[in-house]
Image (tube, rainbow, N blue to C red):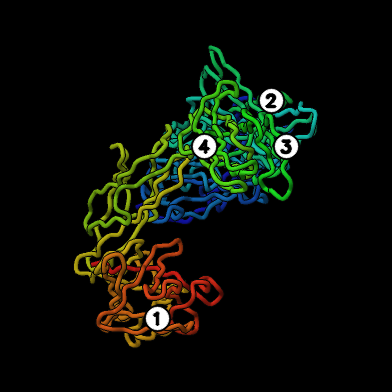
Amino acid sequence: MKTMKKYSILLGAAFAIFALASCQKEVDVNVPDNGVAKHIPFELNADVPQTKTTLDAETWKMDWEDGDVMYAVTTDEAWGEAYPVEADETIAEFVYDSEKGSFSTDMAIADGNHTFNFLYTAGQQKSYHRGTSTTFQLYGTQTFDASDPTASLKIYDALAGQVTATTPTTFAGVEMSHLFTLMKVTLKNKTGASVNISKFEVEIPGENLYGIFNVTFGATPTTAYNRNGGDKITVNISNGTVDNNGSLDVYFVMGAVSDYVGEVTFTVTDNASNTYTKTNTISAPGVSFAAGTYNTASYSLKTADPTECVTLDWIYAGGTAAELNAVPGVTTNGLGSDYAESHAPYRVKFDGNGDYIQVRTDAAIGSVSVGYKKIGGAGNSSLTIKESANGADWTNVQTLELSGANNATGTVSTTNSFASSSRFVQIVFTKSANVGIGPISITKVNTDPVINVSSSNPMAVSNENDLYAVEYSIVNPTSASISASSNVTWIHDFDYSVDGEVSFEVDAQENGASERSGEITLSYVGASDVIVTVNQAAGPGAVTKTYYTKVSTITSGKTYIMVDNTYSMIFDSSNPVQPSVGIDASSLITANGIESTSTTDSYSVTITSDGSNYKVLLSTGKYLVINASTSNNGSITESDAGESITITKVEGGFEFISSNRNTRALVYRSGYNFRNYATSNIGNSGYGGYFDLYELAN
């Protein structure tokens, strides 16, 4: 019979010199001087080529640091279950101890033959590490601190290895292999001045430089691209100041590339938003950056490289012609002498046909807005907004009329679309009367992907084991793929085989189990994550709870609890005419809303539409009335007929205004009563004004 014992498994540290390709060396099994292993039933030595912890940037000799962690699972899932309850509970973590010169763990394992899969990486990059599968996520955006050049390698690099051994008596060794390629690009400053580099990008079209990779273990572990990847690595740089004729070595990690033929583009951005771009064309037989290799390249920044442009969204507040021309990426033509300071911010003078302001942008253009002042008379001059992809060939986008009397001010904005390739804007003047140009704004087109979920959110599922699907669409799609994860184990087995759907399985509820909620997080590279809440019904025989849930619209005839901005429920049935400070709702609000109980129900009201406005029915059976007296405080009463009240959705929630007193909102004053106050008080210290509405689910 196999026994479960808590063994300490040690991994001895091996050291290597970094070379152009993976190198490995033999190491002796780490046993005591007398040749007899005592108190260590199973000992494991790791031969690690060119690793990622403490690294000498000149000699490439590596060393381990205290706290370095290696993760281990077994293929028989003695460690690393298929769907662990807690991801870290079933994975052995081997931690390095510099005094012992080895890694160790106290994780228990049964005696017998096991195949161990080891993964060495920063914890946040380890997507899944299970007994039968491992998925690693390499990020497309990396950070690099020039004051500690190789520190970022320990965050983004990954090593893997496999060994089969019989515990507790077998001695074994494991060889670790890199999963990705390590890069060093030397940026040389030939601009003639000091440059503070903030970002470096490398783009290899069609290659998977980052994303989610499946790891296959064996004598030589390998990775295969899975999904959610892209062909550009972005490295955000800190402490990147480089003197003229100086250089900066930038280290990063990327997916392997094999026999690539095509363009490779380097782009460097400095703190002044200047960009330096160079594209090399690779001819056959191509170039390879294999996993486990160290590769170098260089790129010189020259004065001819910077592209002066404004960063969108761009706002110019107004000023003089000299101030406008000083903005990198902005040029002007034909401007007259500035208008006097008294006309600020409309001081830039358009006084002749064809006068223009030209702006070069760093991104696709969404819209253009221009502020103006009629200074030369009442005649309606106009601005023609033009676009260009190269600054030479121009197309009209829209002509905007500058209307108004002399000295009138205004703002005109484009409503027509710009071409996606355009990076130049011209604002061209056609004269009827002189104008002063003031604030200018140019927005960018939002080309980032967006996940739209069309399924109900939250989603209700039964208490049985069943399959469900989240329906979605992607706005501005790329070559990436959707992925999903859950924060609970009873939601699992995500499937993406049907376009526009992410299907999943839910486990059945046990008898008498309470209703429960979990979250599904949908991810798509470049888009913000979207969370879908899944509410599962209680198990058979359980007491079903009813909740008031937060809403953004009002349905006539529905029952609501009103919660003010101090999280107090109001309209207590014990004193509905003049309610005092209500129950503190902050502790009652859960992911499901406010639970329906006799206590919370006593604070409910029914809101009924009476046409364009509403009436509020109190729990006494009578309707709310706001006294229309002239006093500041007024009063709240009730009657059979009640009063028509305006309820408006605003940014903070809902705003209640008496139709008899349209300048006074129904607001809450902390420590006093719930009454109507002047609108000018809303938002002041001690005053509320906006309310959340929680609708009873029935």
For label 3, count other residues whose C-alpha is less than 10 Å away and answer few (under 14), some (14-19) or many (20+): few
Task: Kindly indicate whether the residue at mark 4 contacts the one at mark 1 (C-beta within 8 angstroms).
Answer: no
Q: Tell me the residue at 31%/43% (across/down).
A: 502
Could you tell me residue 658's position as x and y percent?
38, 74
Q: Which mark is residue 671?
A: none
Determine which residue is flagged by label 2: 305
Label 4 residue SS: strand
Task: Kindly indicate whether the residue at mark 3 contacts the one at mark 4 (C-beta within 8 angstroms).
Answer: no
Q: Earlier in the sequence, mark 1 or mark 2?
A: 2
Q: CA distance from mark 4 to mark 3?
A: 26 Å
Q: CA distance from mark 2 to mark 4?
A: 36 Å
The quarter of the displayed image where residue 555 is located = bottom left
Q: Earlier in the sequence, mark 3 or mark 1?
A: 3
Could you tell me residue 628's position as x and y percent?
39, 81
Whether residue 586 is visible = no
Task: Kindly indicate whether the residue at mark 4 contacts the one at mark 2 (C-beta within 8 angstroms).
Answer: no
Q: Is residue 557 left or right of residue 528?
A: left
Q: Is residue 200 left or right of residue 613?
A: right
Q: Tell me the residue at 45%/64% (across/down).
A: 652
**The residue under label 3 is which amino acid type?**
Ala
Could you tell me residue 523's position as x and y percent?
42, 44
**The residue under label 2 is which amino acid type?**
Asp
Q: Earlier in the sequence, mark 4 or mark 3?
A: 3
Q: Nearer the viewer, residue 646 or 119?
A: 646
**The residue under label 4 is which amino acid type?**
Leu
Q: CA distance from mark 1 to mark 4?
A: 48 Å
Determine which residue is flagged by label 1: 628
Q: Is residue 694 above or below residue 147?
A: below
For label 1, count other residues whose C-alpha is less than 10 Å away and answer few (under 14), some (14-19) or many (20+): some
Q: Which mark is residue 326?
A: 3
